[in-house]
Image (spheres, helix red, strand yellow):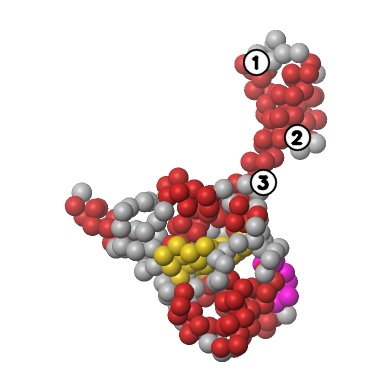
Amino acid sequence: MTKETLDKMKHMRLLGMARAFQSSLESEQTANMTTDQMISFLITSEWDDRQNRNIERQIRNARFRYQANVENIYYDGDRNLDKNLMERFAECAFVEKHEHILITGSTGIGKSYIASALGHQACSQGYKVLYANASKLFAKLKMAKADGSYIKEVARIERQDLLILDDFGLQPMDNQNRSSLMEIIEDRHGKGSVVITSQVPVHLWYEIIGEKTIADAILDRIVHDAHRVELCGESLRKKKNSMNNIN
């Protein structure tokens, strides 16, 4: 009878419930449970399992650069990184409010890790997230225009609650990239959040984007009300390598 019940649970894809039921039988955990308690135990186990699988799926779909989490963000006196501010970001109210975060600083300072950590946190709270290296994303969109899949790609980006654009501004933008960025930002205006990391200070983004009219339109939508994190200090990669050499 027990095997038949377990088989039915698995057939109905009630995998969390099946695992909990089997585990409880082996440990005799449910021996003294009332019927109501038993039902609650099984339903809660299934609920938790589905939530965890959904988070794992969201993280896989996001394609983060780093397996990062906010608890492991490095705070140092010379980094200009406010722990209280990061903890507020980790609550993901900025995603709910469709606000943006701009993270700037020199190479190796940890911009991508922080952005990835916030993305993981958003996934854990049920938000849809997409991480993308800016140069690779624009190259992909160029190819999409050539093969006719551009509308599908832009629609996929638009569906995300949070878009992370990493390493923005490594090279000046051409007309096609400007047009794509404008469309992405316009689609997200008031409907989705963006986290942008860049080695280039925000006041120089006009030069990176080029074409003043389009640059004004893009930056007006993402810069003026955005949260800014301007990292300072030496490269964490260099610091890590130095410590390894010492050890």
| Side of 106 relative to 134 (left or right) | left
Q: How many marks?
A: 3
| Side of 136 relative to 19 (left or right) | left
Residue 164: image location, x then y, percent: 56, 64
Lower position in the chain sequence, tag 2 or tag 1:
2
Q: Residue at x 55, y 71 (%)?
A: 224
Q: Nearer the viewer, residue 37 or 143?
A: 37
213 shown above or below 54: below
In the picture of the structure, the residue carrying the numbered disc 1 is 29
76 shown above or below 181: above
Residue 131: image location, x then y, percent: 56, 62
Task: Assess whether residue 30 is covered by the magenta stretch.
Answer: no
Q: Residue at x 42, y 50 (%)?
A: 83
For the N terminus, the quadrant is top right
Task: Classify residue 237 by image quadrant.
Answer: bottom left
Task: Assess whether residue 152 is covered by the magenta stretch.
Answer: yes
Q: Which amino acid type corresponds to the residue marked 1 in the rendered image? A: Gln
Badge 1 marks a residue whose secondary structure is: loop
Q: Residue at x 57, y 67 (%)?
A: 225
Q: Which amino acid type corresponds to the residue marked 3 in the rendered image? A: Asn
Badge 3 marks a residue whose secondary structure is: helix
Q: Answer yes or no: is residue 246 visible.
A: yes
- Labels 2 and 1 touching (C-beta < 8 A): no
In the picture of the structure, the residue carrying the numbered disc 2 is 14
Q: Which amino acid type corresponds to the residue marked 2 in the rendered image? A: Leu
Residue 181: image location, x then y, percent: 61, 77
186 shown above or below 7: below
Instruction: Tell which residue pokes out farthest to the left in this image.
Output: 246
Q: CA distance from mark 3 to mark 2?
A: 14 Å
In the picture of the structure, the residue carrying the numbered disc 3 is 54
Q: CA distance from mark 2 to mark 1?
A: 19 Å
Q: Which residues are magenta?
A: 150-158
